[in-house]
Amino acid sequence: MRIQITGATLGDVMRMLRAIVFVSLLLAAGPAFAQGLPGGRPPDAIDRARALAIQPFSVPPPPARPTERYVPPARVYSPALGRDVLVPGHYEREVNGQRVEVPPLVVTTPDGLNAVVVPGGERPPIEQRGAP
């Protein structure tokens, strides 16, 4: 099939050929420009928001349980001594979920006299025991 264009010169054909090549390059490179590739538009706030919205969500690990906890000073009844005593503030270290390690404590009567040393060791948590 042969098309004859009357009055067309070689320069006209070359310009038409350049225009066709230019348009085809623009059509082929259009998606690359839209994606923010080199030579295209840079990513904007909408692109960043879209990328954050479609990224996978991961749950952070649960916080670690404290191994030591502070027990504030308290006034408790000691069945071993048969009287109320003041237990100073101290730290207890968790051994497992049901036992804690208590340091040796110096307890006194509410008036500050009659100091007694209560030996340390493993005991139930403070919520489950009534004595120092």
Image (cartoon, rainbow, N blue to C red):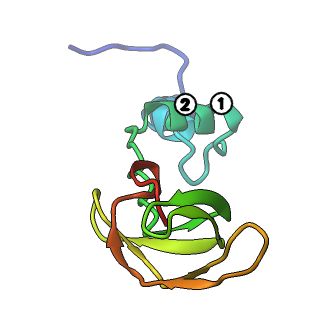
Give the residue drawn at x 30%, y 64%: 99
Spatial CA distance of label 1 from label 2 is 6 Å
Q: What x and y, as percent, mark residue 90?
A: 59, 74
Give the position of the N terminus as an image quadrant: top left
Q: Which residue is mark 1?
A: 46
Query: Is residue 15 depicted above or below 8 in this figure?
Result: below
Name the residue located 38 percent from the left edge and 43 percent from the top edge.
Answer: 58
Q: Nearer the viewer, residue 10 or 27?
A: 27
Q: Is residue 100 left or right of residue 48?
A: left
Q: Which mark is residue 61?
A: none
Q: For the point 33% across and 13% down, which residue is it?
A: 3
Task: Give, as a three-letter code, the residue at label 2.
Answer: Arg
Say which of 21 and 85 sits in front: 85
Give, as a three-letter code, the residue at label 1. Ile
Q: Is residue 24 left or right of residue 41?
A: left
> Where is residue 78 drawn, in percent x and y?
50, 63
In this picture, is 125 found above or below 106?
Answer: above
- Tell me where residue 23 appears, x and y as whole percent: 51, 29
Helix, strand or loop under label 1: helix
From where the camera sits, is residue 52 visible? yes
Label 1 close to label 2 by CB (< 8 Å): yes
**Image location of residue 15, percent across then percent down:** 57, 34
Quick check: can you spot residue 26?
no
Name the residue nearer the viewer: 30 or 116.
116
Question: Which quarter of the picture shows residue 43?
Answer: top right
Residue at point 48%, 40% (across, down): 32
User: In the rendered image of this protein, does residue 110 appear above or below residue 11?
Assistant: below
Q: Determine whether the residue tagged by mark 2 lies in a helix, strand or loop.
A: helix
Q: Residue furthest right?
A: 111
Residue position for label 2: 50
